[in-house]
Amino acid sequence: MDIPKTYDPKQAEERHYAKWEAGGCFAPEINRDAAAPVYSIVIPPPNVTGSLHMGHALQHTLMDVLTRFKRMSGYRTLWVPGEDHAGISTQIVVERELKKEGTSRHALGREKFLERVWQWRHESGSRIMQQMRREGASVDWSRQRFTMDEGLSRAVRESFVRCYEEGLIYHGEGMINWCPKDQTALSDLEVDKEAQAGKLYYLQYPVKGSDRRVTVATTRPETMLGDTAVAVNPSDERYRDLVGATLELPLTGREIVVVADEFVDPEFGTGAVKVTPAHDPNDYAMGLRHELPLVKVIDQHARMTADAGAEFEGLDRYEAREKVVARFEELGLLEKVSDYEFSISKCGRCRTVVEPLISLQWFCKAELARRPLELIRERHEPRFVPEVPYEKVYRDWLENLHDWTLSRQLWWGHRIPAWYTKDGRTIVARSEEEARERAGTNELTQDTDVLDTWFSSALWPMSTLGWPDETEDLRTFYPTSVLITARDIIFLWVSRMMMTGMHFMGEKAFEDVFITGTVFDKHGQRMSKMKNNGVDPLEMFDRYGVDATRLVLASIETTDTRWNEKQVESYRNFANKIWNAARFCLMNSEGARVGEGFGDDRDAWALHDRWIVSRLNRTARAVGDAIEKYQFHLAVQTLYHFFWDDFCDWYIELTKAEVTAEEESAARAAARSRVVTVLEQALRLLHPFMPFITEELWQMLPGVGEQHLHPAYTGAPVVTIMLAAYPRGQEELIDERAEAEVRAIIELVSRVRNIRSEMNIKPGEAVPLLVGAPNESQRAVFEAGASQIARLVRASNISITENLDAPRAAARAVLAGGAELAVPLEGLIDFAQERERLRKEEEKLTKEAERLQSQLANENFVSRAPAEKVAELRQRLADIGQRTGALRQSMEAFAE
């Protein structure tokens, strides 16, 4: 068979993916078994504005591994792809384009602007969906969804109306996070808290009718213009006599009252805090408790209002801050200013400092979290992987949930299905037609706001399957099997999907939640566009192939890790190893057929055949168990060592003489069939992780056809490895004795090879080998495998006895089970020359050890160098110690 010397990943990737997609292999309908178990995943929908990054590639790889594994295991699998309309992000992108054209969304008007956004979506959006094909993602493209599709938009309107009618959604004034730049409300989860060095200002408020003053400490002196109280802790003896007293609020001409509230921390500042209910969420809550008035002194543009006073009206909030502080100093009411570090709230998107404002908005009550909270408390569902710390993180958030601000002051998104009549009534309906019927009039004005993007995302596991209609997909695939996502959207998305799932479906949205680790750059920094330190997965695909990149990503699992391109290169080498091993098998496959060659009588099998079948089944069992438990790193390592070590390094070598025999015979054909049969099973095991190279090689195997597909795919239009049955490992084929016996042979061969290397014996020079094995059964194993051992170590002759009898000038090694071996060196090497070589090598190693010891003794170096560098040096020092010891032993053997 003519097989290229090198593997061309890109050519294979394009060809096989196109074949799989065209053949409908990704759709659940490919499974013909009516009783097949079901497995479903919905993709965390990437933003329509986005392009593939390492976080996506990591999640998509793990989802694809699970989907391919389950598909090969006979499950009816569905992996739903799609995108999120990304309200504010998309609007910003299109507005930037309009700005380049010298216009704006306001100049276009809402309707024309939305037409322009849809045009952009069709022309420039969805790039990431094409990029997913490069990853090998086996998603069902026929079910691709977009959160602004009509079906999903209908689901959004339905859920809003139902929740409104049940009293879970309401329209009213409340404290919100407001972004002065993006001019929209933000939920708490769209706000980032950042530590910042600032100032703490101590302001004095005179007590009315007294010379006494109360000092309050604040980081935002400009908000004092909206104070309506000062609060103290009721247990604070310093202020007990002032509770109920009236204070004169400087700069305003207003009077405020002193109230007692348990919320106040007596240890903060002076123990007395200013209360600005219109501009601080905690103060707002306190204001409700004490029925304090609201004075709004900062507007939606972060400028001071008329209620701040004529002296401050129109000033930017920071300009007002400076002026307030200056005026307090003039009045002798600024006690002091001290340095202070505190958290500041910023818009998660544009990084503008958020302004807490009282605003008329739409809210969803925290009551929606009640059933998910009961489920996680009582049944620990969904199951988080890893459980610690994420189950507690999720539970704690549900326990402390606030009402969710739903409305956003944007144009792109799901418009709130609420209409207003001229007489002030609010009509919430599924359509304008329904609203007119309910209102009894055609004169309606729809709310101009849109819903938070996460409101539609919260419905994703249901809406993508057809909810609110009771579709076959919804009945079959909900709840989904697992959600694979990042920890930073446990609150934004995971919890909300659980809320809507429990509320509308009466079931959790998914069985398991697997939280991935984060991929950092090589310096341990988070990848970001701003830092320009991102690693493009597509570049890795082009450079090393998709399969190699997937192996690195799968190995990350739940652990935060620094991206290491050398690991990708290492797995590219593994892919080459697979190709070369398969190439050897295929070039020696005349007369071979997959599935033949072993025979029914296992007792008649050669030791190395019993061994590889045992190792194959043990590996299959271990890999299957690891994938089921989401232990992807363990699965990758198990597969790597089986293919590289067991199959390539040992089985092919042990069977090579039979496979490459020049004379055609039944024995040669059987040996060749056994090798390609093991290779075929190994390729199946590797396929979920390395879909492309496994498909490329599997299609070349002699005798592979429809008969090798899983029974669920009988009659499938495409014969492909992705529809073959995944090997699960048969207990009866695991042979402990065969594994132990071949392990003994491998150890013996490895020790002799080490001696040849250490003694610099020429590769082509045959050596005598002496083996002493007191254990009779071990001796029998060595005797039975003598011809193979001789070939593998290039021995001129082998002597296997009960006790080792070797000359002094021999290199020795002790084996497990009490056996020993020796390679007599007389005539193989020049002893004097070897002594000199060993002496020089020892001298070189000693100098290197001294240099390393000096470095590691330097406390300044150890404290400043990266931890991995220090560990690397210590390991190198330990290795030198071992090598030096071995060199000295060798020199003793060559002593005159």
Image (cartoon, rainbow, N blue to C red):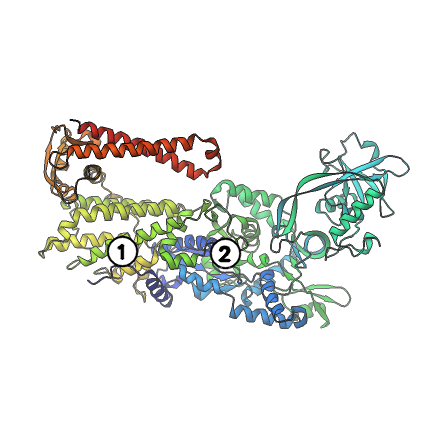
Of residues 14 and 528, the one nearer the viewer is 528
Q: Position of residue 51 (x, y in %)?
A: 49, 60
Q: Is residue 32 above or below residue 651?
A: below
Q: Residues within 10 Å of mark 1 (few under 14, many from 20)?
A: many
What quarter of the picture does the N terminus occupy? bottom left
Q: Amino acid at mark 2?
A: Pro
Q: Is residue 161 above or below residue 489?
A: below
Q: Residue at x 60, y 64 (%)?
A: 91
Query: In terms of secondary structure, where does tag 2 sit?
Result: loop
Find disc 2 in the rendering and name its residue. 44
Of residues 289 and 233, the one nearer the viewer is 233
Of residues 631 and 480, the one nearer the viewer is 631
Q: Position of residue 150 (x, y in %)?
A: 55, 68
Q: Position of residue 164 (x, y in %)?
A: 66, 58
Q: Quadrant of the rendered structure where residue 421 is?
A: bottom right
Q: In the displayed structure, does residue 56 sit left or right of residue 225? A: left
Residue 530 visible? The answer is: yes
Residue 227 visible? The answer is: no
Mark 1 or 2, nearer chain start: 2
Q: Amino acid at mark 1?
A: Trp
For this orientation, the residue located farthest to the right is 209
Q: Position of residue 256 (x, y in %)?
A: 84, 43
Q: Is residue 153 above or below residue 612?
A: below
Of residues 578 and 455, the one nearer the viewer is 578
Find disc 1 in the rendering and name its residue. 579
Q: Quadrant of the rendered structure where residue 352 is?
A: bottom right
